Amino acid sequence: MKSHRYIPMTAQNEADMLAVIGASSVEELFKDIPASVRYEGTMPMSGMLDEYALTRHLSILAGRNADTDRYTSFLGAGIYDHHVPSVINHVISRSEFYTAYTPYQPEISQGELQAIFEFQSYICELTGMAVANASMYDGATALAEAASLAASATRRNKIVAFSTIHPESRAVVRSYARGLNLEVVEVAYGDGVTDISALADVLDNDTAAVLVQSPNFFGGIEGIRAAAELAHEHGALLVVSTNPISLGLLEAPGKLGADIVVGDAQPLGISMSLGGPTCGFFAVSQAQMRRMPGRIVGQTTDRNGKRGFVLTLQTREQHIRRDKATSNICSNQALLALCASVYLSVMGKQGMVDVSGLNVQKAHYAATTIAAVKGCTLAFAAPFFNEFVIRLPEGASASAVNSKLLEKGIIGGYDLGLSYPELSGHMLFAVTEKRTKAEIDQLAIELEASL
């Protein structure tokens, strides 16, 4: 151990700790665990490696991943291969942002607070809502927190959720609902979107909220205004989960009647990172501002009239008003919210329109091209954003098709049979602004060859 000065555990350290505990050996510490369930012998692991050998070994392991630097990805379903402007990593790598945890002392955290305030402002602009919080853990928990807020605000216990919401988000909503004694009722979909008449059939005076995702899990554009009118007729709140990139073209949900707008900010300059972490956003109407979970940064002036930023309207569980806490969410994704803020500031209004338009145009070209492959058809006729569903030929396996595509350097679409048994043999393809015409054409060629 003497040759490794930075390893804090020495034989003497061990002996000293055992003496304080009153144990004669480490073995004695585990005597309460039956010998029959304890592992005997040496774990089947490789031997000790030096720094260079370990780094090389880990690089080889990482190289087994099908990353988007070497593969062309058409996989979306919640995490998307969008362009991440290089300036984002330069900004978030600055130590004052990269190492900051949470601004508990606002007087010395003005830079971090201002960054969060800018994020909130951008989200309000995008969603058409009055107030946004400092961010949530991800889009799924944001949706579940919205359902919780609605139940508290209306004092009702029934949540109506569209079945076209991301399956994992619906699962999180159900998990929250169990703890809060809420009933969750799902509305079936029709031609890739929810049938509004089916929504009307399940609404009643016990309904606290209607949960909608648009663009939905299939990429389809839902009828938000119609859903809002029905929800409000029954005294319920409308919660809309949305892809922020789509709001470069689509009308803001707040202008269509939404009471709460949530979503995942991953498309806004946050790398996929093998599935996370991401950053959720949460925006509400003025009426629901004090019920919003998490933290809010407000803008004010000091005694000298200088602009400053503070945490405001705090009723979170680790503060003194825990009995009035709106949620047990006690933090936010500040660094990833900063990614989104930098992305939106770099893109600007026209940039958001342009990137949204590219997603629509390229996705529709891809849908037309793939649907022309023998035996393949576009499953739904509903308008869509940058994802669409393809029905494979009878008997074709989406899993087998994806395996063959991967051999050709293409990450294929999501196998919808995994989440919707009735859609076995269907694939969900995502096309972002990064995909080129040549890549889309090559996908169609390789898809036909793999069938």
Image (spheres, grey):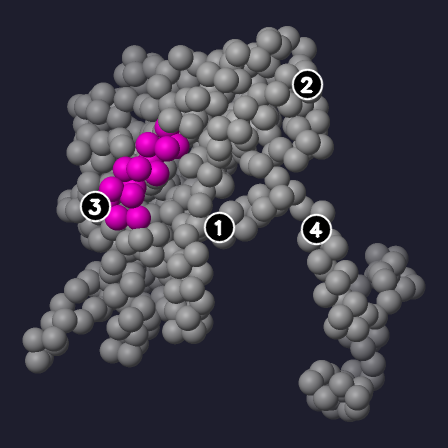
Of marks 3 and 2, the one in the foreground? 2
Measured along the vertical axis of the image, is residue 340 above or below residue 442? below
Q: Considering only order in the chain, which callout, 2 or 3, is on the residue closer to the N terminus?
A: 3
Disc 3 target residue: 125
Q: Which residue is mark 1?
A: 271
Mark sitting earlier along the chain (4/1)? 4
Nearer the camera: disc 1 or disc 2: 2
Indicate left or right for 32 with 392 as reference: right
| First in sequence: mark 1 vs mark 3 | 3
The disc labelled 1 sits on which kind of residue?
Ser
Taking depth in this image into account, of 117 and 178 the one nearest to the observer is 117
Instruction: Return the residue at label 4.
Output: 63
Residue type, mark 3 in image:
Glu
Q: Residue at x 36, y 41 (%)?
A: 263
List the single residue furthest toward the right: 41
- Tell me the SS state at disc 1: loop
Say which amino acid is labelled 2. Ala
Given this view, does label 3 or label 4 mark the residue nearer the observer? Answer: 4
